[in-house]
Amino acid sequence: MLTSKNNNDTVEVSVASERAEAIGGVLIAFFAALMAIAQMVNGELEEEMMIAHNKVVNYSSWYQSKSIKESLKESELDYLSALLESGMVVEEKKAVIIKKINVVQDQIEKYGAEKIEILLGSKQVGEANWIQDLDGEMGNITGVKEWEKLADKYDNATKKFDLGMLFFQISIVLGAVCIIIYDNPKLQKTFIVIMVICGILGIMMSSYGYSLAP
């Protein structure tokens, strides 16, 4: 009788172990597929983030070049104004200097308006204030501030995806351990539960990261 009972227990353990191994194998394949999808999406987001960071650098350089030109024109304006006020300009030439001063003032205002549009973006300044073209078209400037916000959003999204993939990796490791310890069904069930929890956390973090992406 004892031998029969022991044989039955052994069979039950074997069946439970095989069932746990099967479940673990299926879950490993499922979470591995989800992790592959998350990696693909995260790769695209990281690429967009790099583009945004490069745009921040490029547009900041563009903004600085406008600032340098504006400063040069301000220096020129100061020189012309001082020259006019010094009395060194003969009466016949004053009209020429005044005309030049007006031109320089217009250029300073133009550079100032261009700087604002490059910094904030065409949408933010409004169509009435469009002054800087991009490839010959007006109203297409995405400002430095807008690129910075986009870069931050992509950065936050990729961080959440990285965390999600970490949970997927943990769940896959737990699934592998579950298959290895085939002689302990109870422990296998524990690992399967933890594996599912980690997988769900991976799904949640990846979904959250996707929702944060612009």
Image (cartoon, helix red, strand yellow):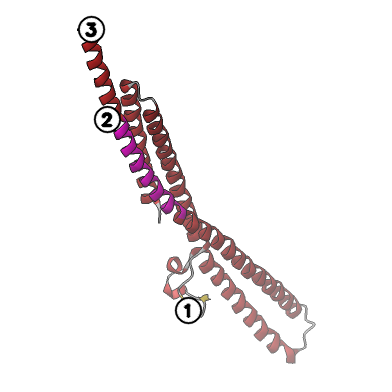
Disc 1: which residue: 137
Disc 3: which residue: 2
Mark 3 or mark 1: which comes first in sequence? 3
- The x, y position of residue 184, in whole percent, is 34, 21
Front of the two marks 2 and 1: 2
Residue displayed at 35% across by 32% down = 195
Front of the two marks 3 and 1: 3
Residue type, mark 1 in image:
Glu
Front residue (pair 126, 98):
126
Describe residue 198's horizontal placement relative to residue 67 as left or right: left
Residue type, mark 2 in image:
Arg
Q: Which residues are magenta?
A: 21-43
- Judged by its main secondary structure, the magenta piece is helix
> Would residue 145 be visible to someone looking at this image?
no
Disc 2: which residue: 19
Front residue (pair 98, 131):
131
Query: Which quarter of the rendered picture does the C terminus lie within?
Result: bottom left
